[in-house]
Amino acid sequence: MDAIQMVDLKKQYKKIKSEVDAAVINVLESSAFINGKPVQDFASNLSNYLGVKHVIPCANGTDALQIALMALGLQPGDEVITPSFTYIATVEVVALLKLVPVFVDVDPATFCMDPEKLKKLITPKTKAIIPVHLYGHAAPMEEILDIAKSHNLFVIEDNAQAIGGTYTFSNGTTKKLGSLGHIGCTSFFPSKNLGGYGDGGAIFTNDDALAEILKKVANHGQSVRYYHDIVGCNSRLDTIQAAVLDIKLKHLDEYIDARRNAASFYNQAFGANEKLITPKEAAYSKHVFHQYTLLLEGVDRAGLMKYLADNGIPSMLYYPLACHKQKMFETLNVPVTDLEVTEWLSERVISLPMHTELTDEQLEHITKTFINYIN
Ligand SMILES: *Cc1c(COP(=O)(O)O)cnc(C)c1O
């Protein structure tokens, strides 16, 4: 049995090696390292895949979120509602731009923003909501979009963990995540579901005017070279990364299937155990399992992680300390909100190896070892 990893990028690469190597060499030969043709090709293929009008590539997922907030013209002191149960990047950019993060609690079944709690946090200063499709599960977008509409708020989807996932509305329409809000953001960090071989990110929108501003912000505030209309930043996707991503995009659906298969193997092994709560998939969401995250009930989590590690099984905590508890917020005047579920989850979550290359033999070893410890 091959060594088990949280994410096995090497094995995945071997399967597409000839394609990827050729594409990378092509970029080297062309020497168009910045804004080469693969960047536009990838953006256009991704826009077709997602069914979104504009894809603006950028340097990473954190930049994507920052550029999105900058493009909306928010002013210091404006409030942005985001979960605290997320990767720090979602919240960090809000604070960086001197906006006020207002933390909303999550639904314990989906790990995503709770729309009822969201409603209660809206004030006259609220300008935007950032739902996060955490672990690959869709946030309840229909409710969030309705709430946003009735209060005239922007919605920025943090889709760093759920590219290729879908949301089905009550009228039966299905859309790809990242294409539902005013702006969608994603990351191509190597371990993400669509990961490059370095950093990368992208911003999505269906709004033509907003697309122009987003492009400008990402490009030093210029649309004509050397004429800078607004204060922007420098955030580009490397041509080499775009070439790699364009190949991996063709495999994304099959990668999602592989992740879903591994998740159902886990669910079958763990579903009946009363000390474990397996991840749910709401009827509106096609889960793409960026992470497979269980909740432990009355299990010594640190002991379990050590036992797994001793048996060659890595595990991780996403995330051990919720954003609102991070030291960085101690000195910022962040409004105190009820985050009971977030704190409850932080103590109970554990994520197991999840990637496209897990074999039945590996899954068998992981689940047996895991059950062995908790029983
Ligand atoms: C990975 C991630 C980001 C940031 O992406 P980078 O490319 O690492 O900057 C933002 N939000 C979430 C939820 C993420 O998982």
Image (cartoon, grey):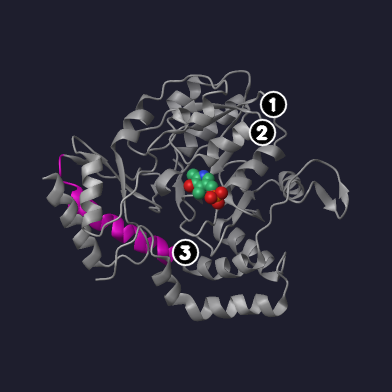
Q: Which mark is residue 361?
A: none
Query: Which residues lie in the magenta part?
Result: 253-274
Residue 210 screen position, x and y as percent:
72, 44
Marks 1 and 2, how far apart at CA: 7 Å
Query: Marks 3 and 2: CB-CB under 8 Å?
Result: no
In this rendered view, identify the residue nearer to me: 94 or 127. Answer: 94
Q: Is residue 37 left or right of residue 316?
A: right
- Mark 1 close to ligand 1, CB under 8 Å: no
In which image quadrant can residue 95 be found?
top right
N-terminal label among 1 and 2: 1
Which residue is drawn at the image coordinates 73% and 46% (left, top)?
233
Q: Is residue 45 left or right of residue 262?
A: right
Seen from this angle, which residue lies furthest right?
Answer: 227
Residue at mark 3: 252
Query: Marks 1 and 2: CB-CB under 8 Å?
Result: yes
Amino acid marked by disc 2: Leu
| Secondary structure mostly taken by the magenta-highlighted segment of the chain | helix
Residue 248 screen position, x and y as percent:
51, 68
Camera sees residue 264: yes
N-terminal label among 1 and 3: 1
Is residue 267 located in the magenta-colored stretch of the structure?
yes
In which image quadrant can residue 125 be found?
top right
What is the secondary structure assignment of the residue under circle 1? loop
Amino acid marked by disc 3: Leu
Residue at mark 1: 76
Residue 290 screen position, x and y as percent:
41, 53
Marks 1 and 3, how far apart at CA: 39 Å
Residue 96 screen position, x and y as percent:
63, 34
Amino acid marked by disc 1: Pro
Residue at mark 2: 97
In this rendered view, identify the residue nearer to me: 69 or 152. Answer: 69
Foreground mark, 1 or 3, reads 1
